[in-house]
């Protein structure tokens, strides 16, 4: 078996070698790898920016950076992490796993696949180059609210162009994923037999197609307001700055579900494998994911309760937001019921999945509290909000990605990762992520606003603790990088199944997965 | 009481932080919760926050308890055999319906407070607040008073890297001229901005509203205790965002009247911009 595999690999490997292989590849595994490596690099870049922010906030007073540069860091940290680290990570996982999980030989549109990845590096080159331009990088927050964002220096058109490219890349990726999933499933794999990761990505792809063009519209209007004399958002010309916020969050709220739904999918793959028990409530998982996606389009103004809106609007957005807790709760309960009476073991992917369930739920709790308009008036724009969305994005989305990487890495490399290193990475990450973000709840309640480089003295202690946590968490990720390098280079050979009787087509191909898989479709 | 308990818990972490915590400047209070409210509405908002928090903690105990139990009880290393079940309609209905009921129970009191919060009618005093990069202007249209409020002179340098100012108790939360209001009176605020979006916020009064150019936003508060209340701009507004404090001084009615008289009866204080200028500004604003 292994001989034939190797022979085939030799025969059907990449046509080009070296850098040309990566530039010209149309292979879903190569492109998946490109996405994942790119995402890791951006994760480290965005993390460095976070450490600059946390260093300045270690104590009151301005010790390290000018307030304007601080604002550039908060803006760029968010843009890099969202568009550079998280979204490409999920697309990378989709590229590697969706064809393997639905029994397809590749993505449906391989050349477009290559293009959608190769748009990313130049887009980020443009975005990061703005740091060195007169006036600096954008400093008005990743939400790009006018009129403030229009005060950006020469970098402004580059930022808009870069975001357009990122949006185009996402839309191309989403189209590819939808076409692959709807057309290239193996015979016998009906929609209700698809693995949850495939389901959540299908729904996410539709969210992307719905949301990204809205962002494109919003930033184009910013561009014309700045350079072509329009007044969409300028009060002096009869425009309304708050309209931008409505348009932005009509993109922005689906966007946060774009960042979490694929993670839900990963967790729904990992937990059954290590509980040795089928996923509880498959149908309700699919329904809940769809319900969350639908609700994500009708809650956007909950980001804007202090902007002044009609009372009926506030009531509507409060209640619709609160009801997201129902399908989200269903997912949490289903994961619990999957664990119930299982036979549980604690390999690294499972540890990250369990931490995800607990810590994402904490982020969900603060989300519910934020939905209550009167309380939100007090929480809004404080560190309570910062704590909330970092709980859902770091031990939520990022832990989801990490769980997926540990889970599928042996399939990709053919080697088992170093379990001891993985466990260290898990425990240090989980402890420090809480040291980092939990005190931020208290800072917010005690009225520390977000996006400030310097603060009043009563906030000192929790900021110090948070900064210690930030460095602990950041440095722990170097263990992850080390583990990845070690696993790519060598390690004990992984079997085709890797884990203890996992479910899914990806475990029927050898490890490492050959360059071409499922050239004849499997039967499900 | 609660605070001291939690203080004990955090002391462990503080010890771990060691010298760092010891080096912290005075004025720290390890606050873990919303500040005490100086208004009745604030008390209701604070109560709502506590209700929501308690509900979350109770759900958390149940969910994390069940999770912890499963992780201990159903370990493979303890010889646990996996069951085969994969759905239960009854369980799924229960954990859909119960959250819906809890949410309805939470939405009703929230809606009540929201309706009260949005009722800006029958105010005793009206103040027009305009945000600037990076200062505030307060205008009392019914009294013909108008003035700017800046961060204090000695704190101006705080926005400069490495200024190394003394970190006193009200560092970054002190202004040259506070907004002044009478106690026990409903104060209606009308907010707008001259440049970018700002947000006017006093935590202890539980009032925060965006100051948006081209729009007049309305909100209100009624302070029940005299004193000085401090806050700052809450919406990112550029380089000086952190250096845009807000201070409200709540006085007895007679003291407030005396303050008004002191500004409106000649000879006025030299720095006060009064009468015609403010009337023009006021009508200009209303005309927008």
Image (tube, rainbow, N blue to C red):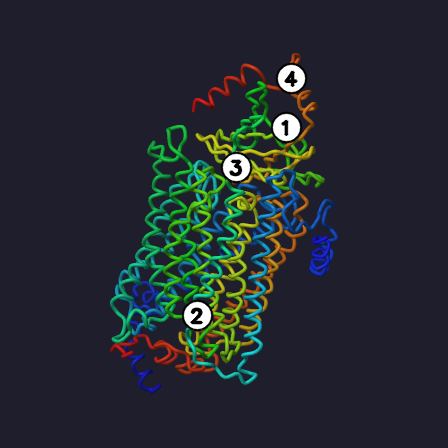
- The chain that hosts pointer 4 is B
Q: Residue at x 44, y 56 (%)?
A: A324
Residue beneath disc 1: B181
Residue beneath disc 3: B209
Q: Residue at x 39, y 62 (%)?
A: A289
Quadrant of residue A423 within the rendered picture:
bottom right
Q: Earlier in the sequence, mark 2 or mark 4?
A: 2
- Same chain for marks 1 and 2? yes
Which label sits on residue B270?
Answer: 4
Q: Position of residue A419 (x, y in %)?
A: 53, 76
Mark 1 or mark 2, whichever is nearer to me: 2
Q: Earlier in the sequence, mark 1 or mark 3?
A: 1
Q: Position of residue A253 (x, y in %)?
A: 42, 51
- Same chain for marks 2 and 4? yes
Front residue of this view, candidates A266 and A157: A266
- Same chain for marks 1 and 3? yes
Mark 3 or mark 2, whichever is nearer to me: 2
- Within 10 Å of disc 4 (Cα), the crowding (few <14, some 14-19, many 20+) is few
Mark 1 or mark 3, whichever is nearer to me: 1
Front residue of this view, candidates A394 and B206: B206
Q: Secondary structure at mark 2?
A: helix
Q: Earlier in the sequence, mark 1 or mark 4?
A: 1
Examine the rendering and report whether any part of residue B136 can be seen. yes
Mark 1 or mark 4, whichever is nearer to me: 1
Residue beneath disc 2: B90
- Same chain for marks 1 and 4? yes
Work out how far the residue at label 1 is from the one at label 3, CA to CA, in angstroms.
18 Å
Q: Position of residue B277 (x, y in %)?
A: 54, 16
């Amino acid at each position: 078996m292994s001989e034939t595999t190797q022979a085939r690999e030799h025969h059907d490997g990449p046509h080009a070698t070296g850098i040309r292989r990566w530039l010209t590849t149309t292979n879903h595994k190569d492109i998946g790898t490109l996405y994942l490596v790119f995402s890791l690099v951006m994760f480290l870049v965005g993390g460095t920016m976070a450490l600059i922010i946390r260093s300045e906030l270690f104590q009151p007073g301005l010790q390290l950076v000018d307030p304007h540069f601080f604002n550039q860091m908060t803006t760029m940290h968010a843009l890099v992490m969202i568009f550079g680290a998280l979204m490409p990570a999920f697309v990378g996982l989709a590229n590697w796993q969706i064809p393997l999980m639905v029994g397809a030989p590749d993505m449906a549109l391989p050349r477009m696949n290559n293009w959608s990845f190769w748009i990313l590096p130049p887009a980020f080159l443009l975005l990061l180059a703005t740091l060195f331009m007169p006036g600096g990088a954008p400093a008005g927050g990743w939400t790009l609210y006018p009129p403030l964002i229009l005060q950006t220096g020469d970098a402004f058109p580059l930022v808009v162009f870069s975001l357009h490219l990122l949006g185009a890349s996402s839309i191309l990726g989403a189209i590819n994923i939808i076409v692959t999933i709807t057309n290239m499933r193996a015979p016998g794999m009906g929609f209700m037999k698809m693995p949850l990761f495939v389901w959540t990505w299908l729904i996410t792809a539709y969210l992307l197609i719905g949301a990204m063009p809205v962002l494109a519209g919003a930033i184009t209007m910013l561009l014309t307001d700045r350079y072509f004399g329009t007044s969409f958002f300028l009060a002096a010309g009869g425009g309304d700055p708050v309209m931008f916020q409505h348009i932005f969050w009509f993109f922005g709220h689906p966007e946060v579900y774009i960042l979490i739904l694929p993670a839900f999918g990963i967790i729904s793959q990992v937990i059954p494998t290590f509980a040795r028990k089928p996923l509880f409530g498959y149908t309700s998982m699919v329904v809940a994911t769809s319900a969350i996606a639908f609700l994500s389009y009708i809650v956007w103004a909950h980001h804007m309760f202090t902007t002044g809106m009609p009372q009926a609007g506030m009531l509507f957005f409060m209640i619709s937001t609160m009801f997201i807790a129902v399908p989200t709760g269903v997912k949490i309960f289903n994961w619990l019921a999957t664990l119930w009476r299982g036979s549980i073991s604690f390999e690294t992917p499972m540890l990250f999945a369990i931490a995800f369930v607990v810590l994402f739920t904490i982020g969900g709790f603060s989300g519910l509290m934020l939905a209550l308009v009167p309380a939100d008036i007090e929480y809004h724009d404080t560190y309570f909000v910062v704590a909330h969305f970092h709980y859902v994005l770091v031990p939520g989305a990022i832990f989801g990605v990490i769980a997926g990487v540990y889970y599928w890495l042996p399939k990709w490399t053919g080697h088992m990762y170093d379990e001891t290193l993985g466990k260290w990475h898990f425990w240090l990450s989980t402890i420090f992520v809480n040291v980092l973000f939990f005190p931020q709840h208290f800072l917010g309640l005690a009225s520390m606003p977000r996006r400030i480089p310097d603060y009043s003295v009563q906030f000192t202690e929790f900021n110090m603790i948070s900064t210690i946590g930030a460095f602990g968490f950041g440095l722990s990720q170097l263990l992850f990088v080390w583990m990845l390098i070690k696993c790519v280079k060598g390690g004990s050979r992984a079997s085709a199944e890797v884990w203890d009787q996992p479910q899914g087509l990806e475990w029927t191909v050898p490890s490492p997965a050959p360059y071409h898989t499922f050239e004849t479709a499997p039967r499900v | 009481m609660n605070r001291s308990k939690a203080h004990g818990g955090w002391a462990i972490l503080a010890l771990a932080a060691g010298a760092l915590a010891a080096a912290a400047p005075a004025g720290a209070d390890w606050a873990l919760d919303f500040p005490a409210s100086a208004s009745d509405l604030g008390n209701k908002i604070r109560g709502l926050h506590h209700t929501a928090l308690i509900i979350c903690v109770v759900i958390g105990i149940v969910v994390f308890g069940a999770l912890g139990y499963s992780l201990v009880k159903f370990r493979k290393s303890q010889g646990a055999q996996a069951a085969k079940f994969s759905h239960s309609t009854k369980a799924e209905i229960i954990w859909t319906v119960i959250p819906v009921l809890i949410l309805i129970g939470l939405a009703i009191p929230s809606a009540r407070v929201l309706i009260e919060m949005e009722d800006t009618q029958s105010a005793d005093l009206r103040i027009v607040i305009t945000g600037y990069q990076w200062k505030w202007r307060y205008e009392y249209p019914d009294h013909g008073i108008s003035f700017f409020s800046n961060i204090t002179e000695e704190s101006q340098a705080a926005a400069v890297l490495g200024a190394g100012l003394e970190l006193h108790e009200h560092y970054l939360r002190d202004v040259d001229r506070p907004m002044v209001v009478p106690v026990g009176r409903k104060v209606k605020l009308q907010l707008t901005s001259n440049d970018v979006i700002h947000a006017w916020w006093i935590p202890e009064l539980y009032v925060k509203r965006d100051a948006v150019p081209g729009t007049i936003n309305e909100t209100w508060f009624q302070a029940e205790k005299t004193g000085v209340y401090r806050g700052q701009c809450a919406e990112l507004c550029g380089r000086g965002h952190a250096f845009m404090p807000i201070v409200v001084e709540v006085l007895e009615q007679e003291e407030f009247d005396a303050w008004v008289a002191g500004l409106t009866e000649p000879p006025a204080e030299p720095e006060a911009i009064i009468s015609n200028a403010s009337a023009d500004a006021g009508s200009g604003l209303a005309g927008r």
